[in-house]
Structure formats: C-alpha cells, structure tokens
Image (cartoon, grey):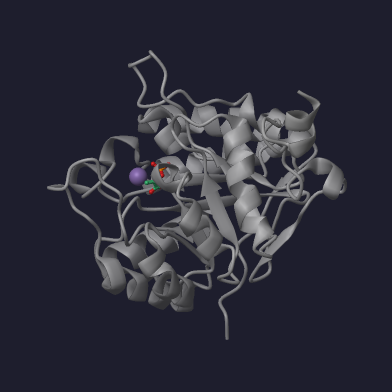
Amino acid sequence: MDTWRSSGAFSEPAPVRLVDRGAKPEGTVLNVLGVHVGGHEVVIMAGPCAVESPEQLLTTAQAVKSSGASVLRGGAFKPRTSPYSFQGLKEEGLEMLAWVRQETGLPVVTEVMDTRQVDAVCRHADIVQVGSRHMHDYTLLEEVGMCGKPVLLKRGMSATLEELLLAAEYVLKQGNEDVMLCERGIRTFEHSTRNTLDLNAVPMLKKRSHLPVIVDPSHGTGHWWMVPWMSKAAVAVGADGLLVEVHCNPQEALSDGPQSLRPDKFCSMMTELREVAQAVGRQISEPRAVAD
Ligand code: PEP
Ligand code: MN
C-alpha cells in the first residue's frame, strides 16, 4: 500500500499552481495596448458576434466606442453548432478586424478555434479568445500559451471552475501569464435562457485565482433584453470586464441576433453601468484615443 502511495500512482489531481491567488496575491493586471484589465477599471468589450463586412464592423465599432467600450469583439472563425450555419469570414474577417482597429484605435479580441489558425489570429488580434467549445483543447491551450498575445479563456459550457482554472494553468505553464477567465453561462435543466449565467463564478474565481474575470451576458442569457440586467449584476459582483454582443440590425445578423443589443440600447446600458461601477468603488474604462 505504502509503495503505491509513495509512487504517486493514485495521487489526487494536481491543484492549480501558477493561476492560484497565492502565486500573485495582488492580482494580475493585463495591459492590452494601454487598456488595463484586472485593475480598478472595468473593461467593456463589445461588438458583433461575427464579422460580416467591413462596413458592418466599422459602424458597430464606432458606435460601441462612442458609448464607451474600450475593446472591439468580433468573430472571424465561428464555432457553429450546425455545419450549414455561417462559419465566419475567416482570414478576410481577421483583416477587417485589423483595419477597424487602425480606424478606431480599439484593441481587438477574436476567437481561435484550431492550432492551425493561431499564427494568423495572433498576427491580427490583440487578445486571442479560446471559446467555450475549445476550453478542453489542451494542444490549443499550449499553443496560445506560446503565442505572446493575451488570452481570453471562456468557460466550457459544462466545465467546473476547477477545470477552467486548470485550462488556464496550461496557458500559464507555457510562459503566457496574460490570461483572462470568462464566465459565459453553463448548461443546466433551465431552457428559458440559452445558458445559465453562473455569477457565483465571479467571486469564486477571484478568490481562487489572481487572473481577471470577464462576464459574457450575451451567451449567458441568449436574450438581448436580459443583457443590461445581467451586465449590471456582473459588475456589482466584481467582474473586471464584460464581453457584449452588439449588432446594428439584429434581425439580419448572421449569428446570435436574438442576444445582440442595438447600439442605442448598448449606450443606455453603459450609462447605467457607470453608476453601478461607482457604487462598488470602480470605474468603467474609457476608450483610448486613435493610434497614430
Ligand atoms: C463567442 O464569444 O463568439 C462565442 C462563440 O462564445 P462561446 O465560446 O462562449 O460560445
Ligand atoms: Mn455569439
């Protein structure tokens, strides 16, 4: 018996090490082109679910920036449940994101689905997103751990917080300490919402890890009208940022229209968010000026 024990053959799974709060009690603050994530300010990342055209992306980016978003989101590689749904504009979409970053000065977050896309995504994005469906792709996690860009790691739709933290551990273990954890809703028996946004995750992750925590109320609810409510709740509960889908014409959106806010609704939400942030001793980050 002792021999087995000492050989470690049946040892407990390794707890998190590098992402553990104890490894950096003061907390990690990422600097994405001058936007600080994880500090006093709450960073709002907003934009369409998918990049659809240069005009769509630029118009949406200008609208969310004028309301106070400081990072632009937009998927070029889209992980769709059906292979017949719009799969994204891929490399062309990445180029549109880079162009709109140039035009607006907003840093860009976009998803990478596969190790073969890592180089291209890293060349164009300021933050590399690993989506819910790929949180368990350990080869991809190792690859983004070596890519030199900040990573936004989304919780798998059925992943425990421990599994999310261990997924982040894969990235840090490769030397990339710039990781944000993202709660985006989990699968439960409740079907009136697309997912169940687990806001318990925010204080729990903040307690267990030094990494910034982002909340995605769009995928977390599936309903645009719920997004402002859950965004305010997320900021109240300590989120370091939000990832929000915005579309100028949700009815015509090529993906996730029902959960996308129109720019005017996004704008009123931002006003309310500033008040909530202030009430909990924080501030919504302001977009940076256009790059020279
Ligand atoms: C997204 O943010 O575009 C996305 C596909 O989200 P998730 O991976 O959380 O489903
Ligand atoms: Mn989406």
User: Residue at the location (30% across, 49% down)?
Assistant: 79
Q: Is residue 88 above or below residue 205?
A: below
Q: Is residue 191 above or below residue 286?
A: above
Residue 223 appears left or right of 26: left
- Give ligand 2's quarter of the image: top left
Task: Determine the residue located farthest toward the top in the rendered image.
Answer: 189
Residue 255 appears left or right of 137: left
Image coordinates of residue 25 in percent, x first then y, are 87, 45
User: Residue at the location (40% across, 75% down)?
Assistant: 120
Q: Is residue 280 visible?
A: no
Q: Is residue 249 above or below residue 110?
A: above
Q: Is residue 205 above or below residue 243?
A: above
Residue 43 appears left or right of 283: left
Q: Nearer the viewer, residue 58 or 163?
A: 163
User: Residue at the location (50% across, 39% down)?
Assistant: 216
Image coordinates of residue 240 in percent, x first then y, are 67, 44
Location of the N terminus by quadrant is top right
Image coordinates of residue 16 in percent, x first then y, are 72, 41
Image coordinates of residue 75 in percent, x first then y, are 36, 57
Task: Determine the residue located farthest toward the left in the rendered image.
Answer: 84
Corner quadrant of residue 93: bottom left
Corner quadrant of residue 195: top left
User: Residue at the location (55% across, 71% down)?
Assistant: 147
Location of the C terminus by quadrant is bottom right
Q: Is residue 58 visible?
A: yes
Q: Nearer the viewer, residue 73 or 224?
A: 73
Residue 201 appears left or right of 117: right
**Count of labels in the image:** 0
Q: Nearer the viewer, residue 94 or 247?
A: 94
